[in-house]
Image (spheres, rainbow, N blue to C red):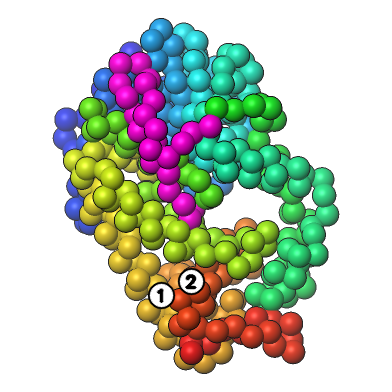
Amino acid sequence: MTQQASMAPQVDKSGLWFPCGDKPAPGCAKEVAPGVWWIRMPMPFALDHINLWALRDGDGWALVDTGVWSTDTAAAWRQLFAGQLNGPVTRVFVTHMHPDHIGMAGWLTRKFGCRLWISRLEYLSCRALSVDTGREAPDDAIDFYRRAGWGEEGIETYRTRFGGFGKLIYALPDSFRRLHDGEEIAIGAQRWRVVVGKGHSPEHACLYCPELKLLISGDQVLPGISSNVSVFPTEPDANPLADWLASLDKLQAAIADDVLVLPAHNLPFNGLHRRIAALRDSQMRALDRLREALQQPRRVIDVYGALFSRPIGADNMLMSLATGESVAHLNYLVARGEASVTLGSDGCAWYRMN
């Protein structure tokens, strides 16, 4: 039976509206606009779900994002194909290369003999990271975390966890159809425009349908939580925060405020421009706190308290995320000439306002 959207929208304290009612159960889909269905898959992480989207495409379905590669995700997809999504998958769109979005893409494209649609940098980045499975952690990565101030216990845990990215991804297809920023794609009776953002990932593709007033935002704009914007050991001098802030400006200019935003996590919402303003304001306040902390020399691990509301303990995954985001904020200030960094005799990078 079709799960219809609720007629009584919820409103949160920030003024965002959530008009689609309860989330669909695993293995079920819920129609949120004509020919657009909301799917929710479980994930084995603290963030325990991802929203996926099925778009009616002729006699079949175009899927947007796929879930992590797991037996639970595969079982949920099989249930959908045997029920509400009965019919062929015509193509698989992936917003970006993180495992919760691309993990089942290879499985789905092989099962239905269809093409993967993704931006070039996302495809190539995913292929590059997937080959780390089974490798030892490289010296450059160890040096990156040592410069951040990590101790030997954290470094050793990182060594044992290295290469886990590829374990959550079914083998990718060997070819893809490239998504270009600004192109329009016919999916069923509608046309969808590709809007590329950066910062959270290299070339994140959102899909915008002006006719239906819908934006599939992936991880580029989320309600309730902010996108992870991190520097990684492969590009230690990157400035993804500048890219992400510029992408927020681009989305606000390119997309009308009256869209229903279909995000990868939490609930679909109205209030895109309000959410973009809140995300931008949150980053500016975090940077102000960081500027205050850097009145004295600090290592990366010393600025966690200025940037995050909860304590960063010994959990290696949480430390990795906090380190990547902290370096992103520090690199932003260094790139603007507001702060400088020197390598201390202890092998750590020390940051200070100029």
The segment highlighted magenta reads: 178-200
Q: Which amino acid lies under the numbered mark 1 shown in the image of this protein?
A: Leu
Which residue is at a point 42% across and 86% down the rendered structure image? Answer: 292
Other residues around mark 1 within 10 Å, as few (<14) / some (14–19) / many (≥20): some
- The answer to whether the residues at label 1 and label 2 have Cβ atoms under 8 Å apart is yes
Q: Quadrant of residue 350?
A: bottom right
Position of residue 287 relative to residue 175, above or below, is: below
Does label 1 or label 2 sit earlier along the sequence?
Answer: 1
**Res. 26 in view:** no
94 vs 32, nearest the viewer: 94
- Residue 200 x %, y %: 49, 53
Q: Is residue 111 magenta?
A: no
Q: Residue at x 60, y 68 (%)?
A: 237
Q: Position of residue 210 (x, y in %)?
A: 25, 32
Q: Which residue corresponds to mark 2?
A: 332
Question: In the image, which disc is placed on residue 287?
Answer: 1
Q: Is residue 171 left or right of residue 96?
A: right
Q: CA distance from mark 1 to mark 2?
A: 9 Å
Q: Quadrant of the N terminus?
A: top left
